[in-house]
Amino acid sequence: MKLAIDRGRVLSEIEALASFSDAPPPSVTRIVFTPTDRRARAWLNERFEEAGLKARQDAIGNVFARWSGSDPTAPVVGTGSHIDAIPDAGKYDGVVGVLGGLEAIRALRRSGFRPKHSIELLVFTSEEPTRFGIGCLGSRLLSGTLSADAAAKLTDSDGASVEQVRFAAGFTGELATVKLADDYYKAFLELHIEQGPILEREHVPLGLVTHIAAPATLRMSVEGSGGHAGAVLMSDRRDALCAASELILAIENAARNSGATDSVATVGICEIFPGAVNSIPSLVRLGVDIRDTELHRRDSVIHQIEEASRAISEKRGVSIRTELLNADPPADCDSAIVDALAQSCKNRGLNFLPMTSRAYHDSLFMARIAPVAMLFIPCRSGYSHRPDEFASADDIARGIVVLADTLGALSA
Ligand code: GLV
Ligand code: MN
Ligand code: MN
């Protein structure tokens, strides 16, 4: 199929979307259901309308922009990603899959192609865990991984529930209606930056994901005893931060000592109370992210963290509470869709690498209700979740053309 990708337009749309941010450029911060997120969504809906797509949104705010096929009853071919961005992020994570998906659809339309299966561009709500503690809120609900009741009870750091926050943002309706039927999709494809260094290092322009690693998140709290930083003697202290420091190092060691380079653990949140220089910390809250390509190894790292927390609690006289927010299995991509992506790469003379995604994505959950595959493009130095995240115009355009070919092949 002859397809012309309007890379200038995609690049300018990436810049425009980045301007909806609660951090100064080049950082992008766009947290779900904030006024900034809502403005970005409104801007995006205008782009969908301009492209002739009919958009609907569900009760959690997942958006489905549809190009109706000649057989509207045939299962849908989906593509898309997310536009929420963690604090101090870059412009490309998720956005390349949404705006790249939009341009792939526009290019197919311009070429005169008419699909038999409808093609839907999805914008998932809250792929990032920033606000509600767990990632992929929209795709967990769509796939039935998370029940409506459990989702409604999640709260943000101000104690506001998903129900309160989504209603205030104008997303009403019953969460129970978000789940899609198991036969809704023929296929789902997600274009994304790699978020790691392999493609760039190997000088390969495209990665075909075959496997998505298993993520888990813990919320841990360490409670000791506060007091005056001058008056309480060292021998009388039960300092929550000193205990948490030991715990943080034990978490690092648990991943380092697993025997596999695929085991990773990160303490990305550390909140200290009361947070005054002359006050002994009485409470520390940690957010812990643990991942592995192998489920049993990921779970054994969690087990070691629990053992370490018991030992530290006893030794330091503090109480440590652990809440498991999510522990998800890995997912395999569908070999027929991966083959369709590979066929497009071959037709276009593009080199590709089969690879594992160590980051999680909405595709991890879409894999429960649809055959999925992911297409990675390189990002500079493998940087992601930081303001200097960058993907080149050539790499973005290559990703879009292969995505468009494959959407065309699957929807014909
Ligand atoms: C997604 O943002 C992830 O943390 O893998
Ligand atoms: Mn991300
Ligand atoms: Mn992402």
Image (cartoon, helix red, strand yellow):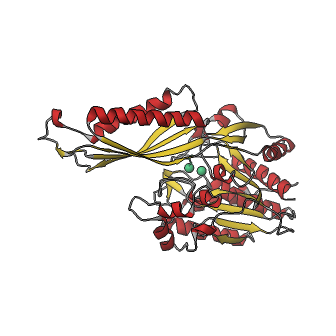
User: Residue 182 at what x, y percent from top left?
Assistant: 73, 59
- Residue at 47% x, 57% y: name it: 132
Q: Nearer the viewer, residue 63 or 133?
A: 133
Q: Which image quarter is the C terminus in?
A: bottom right
| Residue 6 figure quarter | bottom right
Classify residue 351 as left or right of residue 60: right
> Relative to 171, is 306 above or below?
above
Q: Nearer the viewer, residue 75 or 270?
A: 75
Classify residue 396 as left or right of residue 272: right
Q: Which image quarter is the N terminus in?
A: bottom right
User: Residue 53 at what x, y percent from top left?
Assistant: 73, 70
> Relative to 131, is 347 above or below?
above
Q: Nearer the viewer, residue 286 or 81?
A: 286
> Relative to 392, is 142 above or below?
below
- Residue at 40% x, 58% y: name it: 157
Query: Can the viewer see residue 333 in this picture?
Result: yes
Labels in figure, total: 0
User: Residue 204 at what x, y percent from top left?
Assistant: 72, 36
Classify residue 82 as left or right of residue 281: right
| Residue 261 figure quarter | top right
User: Residue 151 at what x, y percent from top left?
Assistant: 52, 61
Query: Can the viewer see residue 387 in this picture?
Result: no
